[in-house]
Amino acid sequence: MNQRTPLVLGNWKMNTLPEEGRLLARQMAPTIKDGLHRRVDWGLAVPLTHLGLMATELRGHALMGAQDCSMHERGAYTGEVSAAMLSASGCDFALVGHSERRQYHGETSIQAGLKIRRLQEQGMMAVYCVGESLEQRQSGDYATVLQTQLHEGLQGEGLSLDSSALVLAYEPVWAIGTGLTASPEQANEVHALIRDWLLRNRGPEAAAAVRILYGGSVNASNAADLLAGPDVDGALVGGASLQIRAFADIVLSAS
C-alpha cells in the first residue's frame, strides 16, 4: 500500500460570483471536516476574482488554488497573472496545462513546463494536467501522447518532484464534461503508465512521491471505484465540486 496522502481538488472553472463562491466554501469546509476519518488533502481551484474572499474561508481547512498561471515572471503581458501575484494572494497551488487551456488557448506542454517552474520558484504546488483526446484513445496512441506531454512539461534540471511541489493529473479529454468516464481499470492503467514514466525518467523516489489524480467526469457515484486503484491518488473534480454534498462525498471517498 502506498504512503501518499490522498488529494482531491475541485476546479470551479468560470462559475460562481465571488460572494456565491464564498458561501459555497463556508458550507463545504465543515461538511468535509466532520466526515473525515483519516488524512486527506483537499482544495479548490477558483476564479481569480474569488481569491481574496476564499483565502479567509479556506485557511486552516483546505488548499486554495488558481486555474492558471503566467509562464512569465513579470512584464508587459496584459491580462496575465504571475506566480508571485498568486502567492501574494494566498494561493497554495495552480493548475497548469488543463485540457481547456490547451484546446481554447493553444497552450503547449513546453509552455506548461515554464509555468510549473514559475510556481515552484514561489514555493507553490503545480498541478500538471495531461491527457489524450478521443481520437488518440481510439487509435491506441494515448501512451505516446502522454509520455510526450510528460517529457515536454517536466524536462530540464532543477524541477522539484517533491509531493508538495508537483502533482500530476490525468484527465482524458474525451471524459471531461461529456458524462463519459474512464473505467477504474482504464484509469489505473494510465496512472501506472505515468508512474512507470516517472520511475524510468526521474527515479524511484519521484515515482513513489508524486501524486497522480484522475480527472474526467468524477462524481459522487463513481468516485469510490475510480479512487480504489493503487496508482490513483485522488481526483481533479469539475462540475461536482460546485455541489456541496457531492464534493464532500468525493473527498470522503478518498479517505
Image (spheres, rainbow, N blue to C red):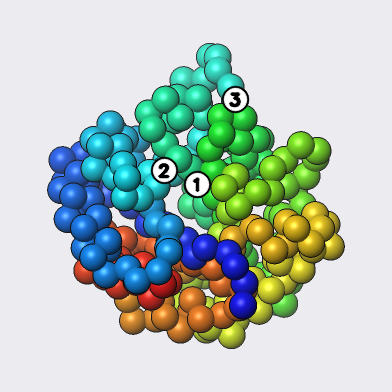
The quarter of the displayed image where residue 90 is located: top left
Badge nearest the viewer, 2 or 3 = 2
Q: Residue 224, position in %: x, y?
A: 42, 80
Task: Tell me the residue that label 1 is attached to.
Answer: 95
- Answer left or right for 7 relative to 2: left
Amino acid type, callout 1: Leu
Badge nearest the viewer, 2 or 1 = 2
Q: Judge the density around disc 1: few (<14), some (14-19), many (≥20) Cα neighbours within 10 Å.
A: many
| Viewer-side residue, 215 vs 40 | 40
The quarter of the displayed image where residue 157 is located: top right
- Residue at the image position 46 percent from the left and 29 percent from the top: 87
Query: Along the polypeptide, which appears first: circle 2 or circle 1?
Result: 2
Which residue is at the far top? 76
Amino acid type, callout 2: Gly
The answer to the question of whether label 2 and label 3 lie on touching residues, with beta carbons closer than 8 A, is: no
Task: Tell me the residue that label 2 is attached to.
Answer: 65
Is 82 rendered above or below residue 138? above
Task: Tell me the residue that label 3 is attached to.
Answer: 72
- Residue at the image position 35 percent from the left and 50 percent from the top: 62
- How many numbered callouts? 3
Is 121 rendered above or below residue 180? above
Q: Residue 198, position in %: x, y?
A: 76, 60
The answer to the question of whether label 2 and label 1 lie on touching residues, with beta carbons closer than 8 A, is: yes
Q: Residue 9, position in %: x, y?
A: 42, 57
Amino acid type, callout 3: His
